[in-house]
Amino acid sequence: MKITAAVVNGANEDYQLEELTLGELYSDEVVVKMVASGICQSDEGIRNGSSAVPPLPAVIGHEGAGIIEKVGSAVKDFKVGDQVVMAYHYCGTCPGCRTGQPSSCNQWAPLNLGGVRPDGSHIFFKADGTPVSNFFNQSSFATHTITSVNNLIKVEPEVDLRLVGPLGCGFLTGFGTVVNGLQPKTSSAIAVFGTGGVGLAALMAAKIEGCSTIIAVDIHDSRLETAKELGATHTINSRTENLAERIAEITDGLGVNYSVDTTGISSVMKASLDVLAIGGVSAPVAVAKESIEFNTFSDLALTNRKVIGVLMGGAVPQLAIPTMIQYYKEGKFPFDKLVKFYKFKDINQATADSNSGQTIKPILIIDEDYRKDEPLVFNK
């Protein structure tokens, strides 16, 4: 089957729209006709060469939404025509998966980052036979893709697929980090560092979970204004204000009970730990090369603080994504305020706008014929 995909052929090269061939469909897989895909900072890490996985050339993208076009012989719970959102892959049989924690799957890294199936086979091929790596076992920057049933979340026919792709990664990570990772107590205080898509999803989740003090920290006033609209009770521009003094002022000198860092910047990650109250918990979730240095006694043990790792929000996508959609319908999780739409051919512009901060969450519309009677406004 011939398809069109945005291929990254070399580190820090632009996406190239190319004709590829889909490989063999396995019995537990489906072919998905892509409708739309969000762009995530993890995609940018691969494109610009800061991430070494998967091997290039590759078709990346991992916030896809589309319609099932073909099903393998062993597929039981999905049929042709189903609308689906795609999230991460997991094996389904290891202890982590069996105990309801697929983000702790023993095979998570090779399944999602290896670029090939478990048997080493590829999904995409160039005209000359050159294999092309996949990503998250979905590679959503394509007109069609092959993926496993474990990647899929079925959504109702009335759900607009042009909007919901980012629920599969960025918004899932922010939402789940709060709901599943931190599990904040009602009336507690939380600080969210970085108000991009992940951070703002975490902020909205904190409001849903009943945090009474929600502090958004960023260096861009425009994003802090958005944070206020979405539920922040306080905002801090850490470039122009003293972060420690402001948080002490807001919390009567106690500090916050929880913090989330989405920046991946060493100094900011350390700050997200330093502002914790006694017994506080910090979750640094950015995909970044920078590290954090702290003293295990004075920074953690002496104050009973914790730093926790949370992958993909610690979420079961098949449960969390329908929940987020329901919260969206109820007006509690208005993630649509964070997105801008781009045509598939404008993927490089969408990436540039994301990198510059002009767009919080770009969404590529791959199938412009989907719901043509409900036209979108495209960013250019």
Image (cartoon, grey):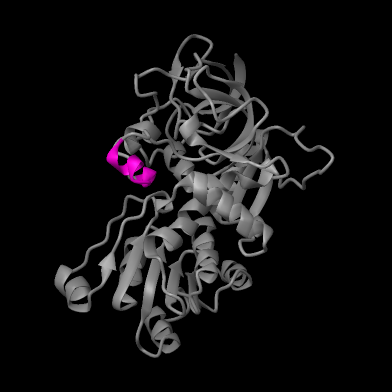
Location of residue 375 in the rendering, given as x and y in whole percent from the top left corner = 81, 43
Q: Residue furthest right?
A: 373
Q: Quadrant of the C terminus?
A: top right
Judging depth in this view, the residue of 272 and 181 nearest the camera is 181
Q: Quadrant of the N terminus?
A: top right
Judging depth in this view, the residue of 305 and 40 nearest the camera is 305
Displayed quadrant of residue 279: bottom left
Location of residue 155 in the rendering, given as x and y in whole percent from the top left corner = 63, 42
Residue at point 38% right, 65% down?
182
Q: Residue furthest top?
A: 128
Q: Is residue 359 visible to us here?
A: no
Q: Is residue 96 magenta?
A: yes
Segment colored magenta: 94-103
Displayed quadrant of residue 370: top right
| Left-right relation of 162 to 19 | right
Residue at point 56% right, 54% down?
323
Q: Residue furthest front?
A: 76
Location of residue 239 in the rendering, given as x and y in whole percent from the top left corner = 46, 73
Q: Is residue 345 visible to us here?
A: yes
Q: Is residue 176 magenta?
A: no
Judging depth in this view, the residue of 335 and 15 nearest the camera is 335
| Number of numbered discs visible in the structure rendering | 0
Displayed quadrant of residue 160: top right
- Where 231 falls versus 123 (above or below)? below
Q: Main secondary structure of the magenta part?
A: helix
